[in-house]
Image (spheres, rainbow, N blue to C red):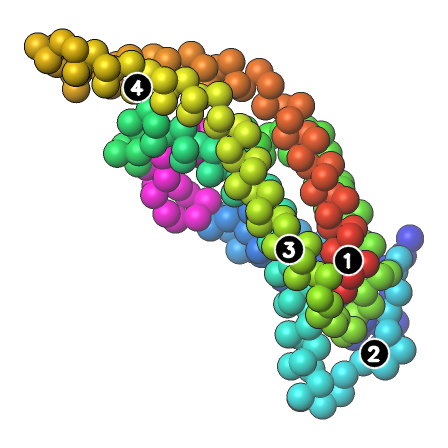
């Protein structure tokens, strides 16, 4: 399919498609990371805009005045924030599970710089995040997102975003699911380490001569790492189902806009 740039209206359509795509990509968890050069993000946005412009519906009338242009850009920004936030919730839940596990194991004191966000995070949280990104691309999660992006142009034409009450409910429910997914991933390790700390506490009360502080950290780390390896075996199918649920949530959000 030939990319049309023969008229001023087609150039305007390409510009507004590029605005929506670039905002979403710059807010995505992986593509919008600080470690990825801006020129790569801009090039990917430009390539997707060139591919999607001939196949998505364009409005008959484009904004002409400065006020209309500003309101249209804000409208596209809101669409990008909603879609990118839904994807970020999924990856944030995995990072939250890593934070829970690291806190129980005693790894919360050892933090490293996260190149994706520029903030300090635990090693297990960063490991789970990178593993979730690999699973996301392995099961073609990016195809689900591109499909939802194309559907957004059909369900929500350019410059026609409107806030719906049901939209806020879906976003709030997705935020609650972030905590639920994080706790489900970390629950086996958290329960085991809680029982371990409880047992060590009983030993400290019954045998005060035992230095619990010196033996508690190695025991919790060993138990945590063993269970962490067992949890990793079940993480891919669990995360795959979560990605599919995310795809359905994206479609639901688009229809509510």
Image height of 56 relative to 130, above or below: below
Q: Is residue 96 visible?
A: yes
- In the picture of the structure, the residue carrying the numbered disc 2 is 8
* Contact between labelled residues 1 and 3, with CB atoms less than 8 Å apart: no
- In the picture of the structure, the residue carrying the numbered disc 1 is 254
Q: Is residue 18 visible?
A: no
Query: Residue at image x 36%, y 17%?
Result: 195
Q: Position of residue 24 (x, y in %)?
A: 64, 57
Under circle 2, the secondary element is: helix
Which label's residue is closer to the chain start, 3 or 1? Answer: 3
Residue 198 disc label: 4
Query: Residue at image x 78%, y 52%?
Result: 252
Under circle 1, the secondary element is: helix
Residues in magenta? 112-127
Residue 137 disc label: none
Which label's residue is closer to the chain start, 1 or 4? Answer: 4
């Amino acid at each position: 399919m030939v990319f049309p740039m023969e008229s001023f209206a087609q150039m305007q359509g390409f510009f507004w498609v590029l605005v929506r795509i670039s905002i979403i990509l710059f807010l995505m968890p992986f593509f919008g990371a600080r470690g990825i050069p801006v020129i790569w993000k801009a090039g990917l946005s430009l390539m997707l805009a060139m591919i999607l412009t001939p196949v998505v519906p364009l409005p008959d009338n484009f904004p002409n005045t400065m006020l209309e242009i500003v309101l249209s850009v804000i409208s596209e920004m809101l669409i990008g924030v909603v879609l990118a936030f839904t994807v970020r919730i999924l990856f944030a839940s995995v990072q939250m599970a890593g934070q829970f596990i690291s806190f129980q194991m005693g790894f919360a004191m050892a933090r490293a710089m996260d190149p994706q966000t520029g903030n300090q995070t635990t090693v297990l949280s960063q490991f789970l995040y990178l593993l979730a990104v690999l699973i996301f691309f392995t099961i073609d999660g990016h195809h689900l997102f591109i499909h939802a992006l194309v559907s957004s142009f059909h369900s929500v034409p350019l410059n026609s975003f409107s806030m719906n009450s049901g939209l806020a409910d879906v976003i709030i429910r997705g935020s609650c699911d972030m905590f639920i997914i994080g706790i489900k991933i970390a629950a086996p390790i958290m329960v085991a380490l809680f029982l371990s700390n409880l047992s060590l506490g009983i030993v400290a009360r019954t045998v005060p001569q035992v230095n619990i502080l010196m033996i508690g950290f190695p025991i919790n780390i060993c138990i945590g790492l063993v269970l962490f390896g067992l949890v990793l075996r079940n993480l891919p199918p669990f995360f795959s189902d979560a990605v599919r649920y995310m795809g359905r949530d994206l479609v639901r959000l688009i229809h509510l806009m």
